[in-house]
Amino acid sequence: MMIKGSCLCGDIHFETGAEPKGASMCHCSQCRKQSGGIWSSAYVADSDLTITGPVSWYAASDLAKRGSCPRCGSYLFWKAHDEDTTSFALGAVDGSTRLKITKHIFVASKGDYYDIADTVPQQD
């Protein structure tokens, strides 16, 4: 299974042959501010993810950094400082992900302008 993705302008590409884990929808205030809504992602080990292009990393907190394209602004990656995995945006995948969302995270921070209407588990 090969998953490939890119930013809007095509300057950044990523790919993995590993089975992604943790497909989730994040409702935290940082993801909402950066993406304009809910951010969907999955993660793989850093050693299983190839990223090419000029990723701009921003340390959004003491816990993690976020990677985006400096030209088009696409928000592509999330990486905890103390973990050896990287989350990638499911919306940036070129073609089918063949994944299903397994959880909603940070639902206590979700926007008041929508409801979570599916039966996928929710974590505060």
Image: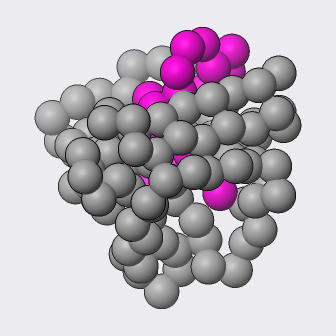
Q: Residue at x 39, y 19 (%)?
A: 117
For residue 36, say whether it is visible.
yes
Instruction: Name the quadrant containing residue 45.
Output: bottom right
Q: Position of residue 62 (x, y in %)?
A: 48, 86
Q: Residue at x 82, y 21 (%)?
A: 1
For residue 110, say whether it is visible.
no
Q: Residue furthest left?
A: 113
Task: Note whether 54 is above or below 20 in the view shown.
Answer: below
Q: Position of residue 70 (x, y in %)?
A: 29, 59
Task: Indicate left or right for 119 with 71 as reference.
Answer: right
Q: Residue furthest bottom?
A: 62
Instruction: Name the quadrant containing residue 28.
Output: bottom left
Q: From which residue to which does the magenta span run? A: 86-106
Numbered label tally: 0
Q: Is residue 91 magenta?
A: yes
Q: Residue at x 40, y 44 (%)?
A: 11
